[in-house]
Structure formats: structure tokens, C-alpha cells
């Protein structure tokens, strides 16, 4: 019975996103966002503990506030037109209000304060949904409403800055991935400057790498850095493949995660060189704490018998090993092919 309820809410979650991205009216977009919100809260609250309950309440309040602001700005702009493709922004304040509500739903800086706190109370599967699927609908709305102005450039700069600085002193893997997600939001917003195809490529690669990393964290129930170090004592191949995926998420060439960043850098290096330079510097900070995790995992050898006995009971299957290998090696192959092509 529990599985049926979970399946129903996940189907409603997907349906809400599909309604949002396929709707032609603003009320349809708002309705899809609300269906998505009301179906994700029961998924958060499946486990009856205080952390998931607290996270679900915080998530509801933040998303309800953003939906209220978005609905208010929609009602004001619908006095001009009811269709997205015919909408005319007669007031810059309303345009900024609408974009701010969407960015609050997205978790972009400086509206990011709820994101690491909520993700700390979730399990890994819900964290994966929050970091990947829940970004699709707000990003698609931003593609309709975003105009290149100083406000959007400020959001991009703050997202890359806070996403890189915020993850430096964290010991929780969920918060590290949350701040890394904020940094990637800045890159995704930059991809809208070119076209939506670039955003789709970036989002698909980011989602694929996140699935590969979170799959192994969920398998061994790892949430802190010290647990990650202890896991690495007697599983060297899994260690190297997982660290390759962490470096790929940080954007280190020649891994797969560098490919979408390379596309953005190549297309915007002539138009906005200072913005790209700043984003590259902030990504190097993000890559620094991934390198620090990788270096510590390789060099530190800590024997914890109780934890190792738990790991021996959970034998790792070949499917996950093949998935991690494919993710890491496929990035190198793509990188080599693009170099030969250009």
C-alpha cells in the first residue's frame, strides 16, 4: 500500500511539471506548479521523523510564498494579454517580481537560504528530485520571462559566488551537493543567453552525473564526509569511479561535466568575457572542495570495524559499477571526439 501511494504522488509530481511546461496560459502554469508542490510534500513526509516533517513545512511555506508572488504578478500582467507569446511587460517592477518568485522556487542566490536547510532533512532520493526534476518547471518559465538585464546578470554572479563559497566548510554531503547545485543554477541561467538547447544539454548531463553520485550514496546510506572516508577502505574501484564522478560534477576536463561548461565558455567568451572569467574562477573554488574530498578519500585510511561489517553485508552489484564506469569514461570519449571535430 505504501508503494502505491508513493507511485501516485510521483505520477502527480511528473504531471504537474508537464502541465507547466506545456501550458499556454499563465493560470495553467501556476496550476501545474501547485500540483507539483502538493505532490512533492507527501513524498518528503513519508518517513515519520522530525527532520522530514520540518523540511516539508519549510518547503511548503517557501513555495507557497513564491506562488503567491507569482500569481499576483501574473494577474497584473494578464491585464495586457492572456497568452505567453503575446505578453508585453509594461512595468519593469512586475517583471522583476515575477522573475524573483521563479528564482525563489528555483533556489537561486540570493533566494537560496531555504535550499541547503531543507535538503539536509531529506533522504537521497528526495534530494535528487529536489536538485534535478524540481528545477525543470521554473527554468522553463524563466526561458519565457527572462530578459538580459543587470538583474539577471546579478543573479548569475551571486549564484556562482555563493554556490562555490558556501560549500567550502561543509561536512554534510547533502549540503555540499546543494551548494554545488546553486553554482550550476548560475551556469544554467547563463546557458539561456544562447538558446534552450544548450540548457537542455547542460541539465541532462548534470542530472545524469547527480544520479550516478547519489545512487552510491543512497546504496551505502552515506551522509557525512567521515562516512565517505570509511567506506573507501576496501572498495578501491568504486572509490575511483565515484571520485571521477565528483570531479566530473565539478567540471574538471576531460570528464563529462566539463562538456556543457565548454560549450558555454566557447560561445560567450567573445560576448561576455568578464562574466565567463568570473564564473570560471568560482567553478575552480567548487572544484577545490571536490578535489579536497578526493584527495582525503585516497590518502586517509581509517579502519572502523562496525561500518565495514555493514558494508560487507551490502555487496555492491555490477550494474552500479557499470553505470559509474560509463559516466566517467564516456566523458573522456566525448571530449576527444569534440577536439578532433574542431
Image (cartoon, rainbow, N blue to C red):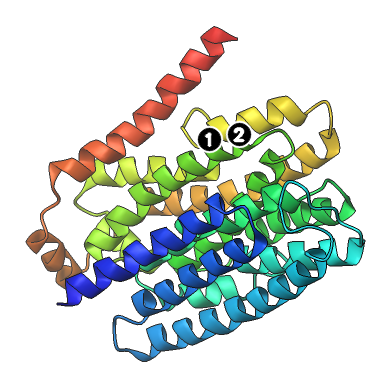
- Tell me where residue 51 appears, x and y as whole percent: 40, 86
User: Is there any visible trace of residue 173 in the rendered image?
Assistant: no
Q: Residue at x 53, y 72 (%)?
A: 34
Give the vertical position of 59 relative to 337 (above or below): below
Name the residue tied to disc 2. Answer: 198
Q: Residue at x 40, y 43 (%)?
A: 208
Q: Which mark is residue 201?
A: 1
Q: Nearer the viewer, residue 69 or 260?
A: 69
Q: Residue furthest bottom?
A: 50
Q: What element does badge 2 sit on? A: helix
Q: Nearer the viewer, residue 286 or 193?
A: 193
Q: Nearer the viewer, residue 145 or 81?
A: 81
Please state if 222 lies on the left or on the right of 205 as rendered. Answer: left
| Image quadrant in which the C terminus is located | top right
Give the vertical position of 209 relative to 310 (above or below): above
Q: Residue at x 71, y 43 (%)?
A: 190
Asked where in the image residue 227 lies, by quadrant, the reply is bottom left
Q: Residue at x 71, y 51 (%)?
A: 84
Give the vertical position of 66 relative to 127 (above or below): below
Q: Nearer the viewer, residue 202 or 37?
A: 37
Q: What element does badge 1 sit on? A: helix
Q: Neighbour class for label 1 at 10 Å: few (<14), some, many (≥20)? A: some
Q: Are marks 1 and 2 in contact (CB under 8 Å)?
A: yes
Give the vertical position of 165 relative to 156 (above or below): below
Q: Neighbour class for label 2 at 10 Å: few (<14), some, many (≥20)? A: some
Please state if 92 lies on the left or on the right of 161 as rendered. Answer: right
- Tell me where residue 233 appears, x and y as whole percent: 24, 54
Distance (Cα) linking label 1 and label 2: 5 Å
Count of numbered labels shown in the rendering: 2
Q: Which mark is residue 156?
A: none
User: Is there any visible trace of residue 237 in the rendered image?
Assistant: yes
Amino acid at each position: 500500500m505504501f508503494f502505491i501511494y508513493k507511485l501516485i504522488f510521483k505520477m502527480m509530481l511528473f504531471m504537474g511539471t508537464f502541465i507547466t511546461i506545456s501550458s499556454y496560459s499563465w493560470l495553467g502554469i501556476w496550476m501545474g506548479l501547485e500540483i507539483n508542490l502538493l505532490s512533492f510534500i507527501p513524498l518528503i513526509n513519508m518517513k515519520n521523523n522530525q527532520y522530514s516533517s520540518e523540511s516539508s513545512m519549510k518547503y511548503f511555506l517557501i513555495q507557497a510564498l513564491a506562488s503567491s508572488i507569482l500569481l499576483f504578478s501574473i494577474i497584473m500582467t494578464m491585464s495586457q494579454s492572456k497568452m505567453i507569446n503575446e505578453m508585453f511587460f509594461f512595468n519593469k517592477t512586475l517583471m522583476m517580481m515575477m522573475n524573483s518568485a521563479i528564482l525563489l522556487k528555483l533556489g537561486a542566490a540570493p533566494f537560496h537560504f531555504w535550499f541547503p536547510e531543507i535538503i539536509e532533512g531529506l533522504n537521497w532520493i528526495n534530494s535528487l528530485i529536489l536538485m534535478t526534476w524540481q528545477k525543470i518547471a521554473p527554468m522553463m518559465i524563466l526561458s519565457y520571462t527572462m530578459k538580459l538585464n543587470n538583474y539577471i546578470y546579478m543573479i548569475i554572479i551571486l549564484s556562482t559566488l555563493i554556490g562555490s563559497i558556501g560549500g567550502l566548510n561543509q561536512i554534510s554531503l547533502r549540503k555540499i551537493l546543494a551548494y554545488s547545485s546553486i553554482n550550476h543554477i548560475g551556469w544554467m541561467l547563463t546557458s539561456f543567453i544562447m538558446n534552450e538547447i544548450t540548457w537542455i544539454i547542460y541539465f541532462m548531463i548534470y542530472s545524469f552525473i547527480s544520479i550516478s553520485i547519489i545512487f552510491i550514496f543512497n546504496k551505502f546510506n552515506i551522509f557525512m564526509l567521515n562516512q565517505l572516508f570509511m567506506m573507501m577502505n576496501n572498495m578501491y574501484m568504486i572509490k575511483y569511479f565515484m571520485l571521477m564522478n565528483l570531479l566530473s560534477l565539478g567540471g574538471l576536463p576531460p570528464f563529462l561535466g566539463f562538456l556543457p561548461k565548454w560549450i558555454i565558455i566557447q560561445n560567450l567568451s567573445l560576448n561576455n568575457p568578464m562574466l565567463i572569467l568570473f564564473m570560471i574562477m568560482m567553478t575552480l573554488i567548487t572544484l577545490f572542495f571536490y578535489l579536497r574530498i578526493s584527495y582525503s578519500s585516497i590518502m586517509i585510511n581509517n579502519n572502523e570495524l562496525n561500518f565495514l561489517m555493514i558494508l560487507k553485508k551490502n555487496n555492491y552489484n555490477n550494474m552500479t559499477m557499470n553505470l559509474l564506469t560509463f559516466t566517467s569514461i564516456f566523458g573522456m570519449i566525448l571530449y576527444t571526439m569534440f577536439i578532433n571535430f574542431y
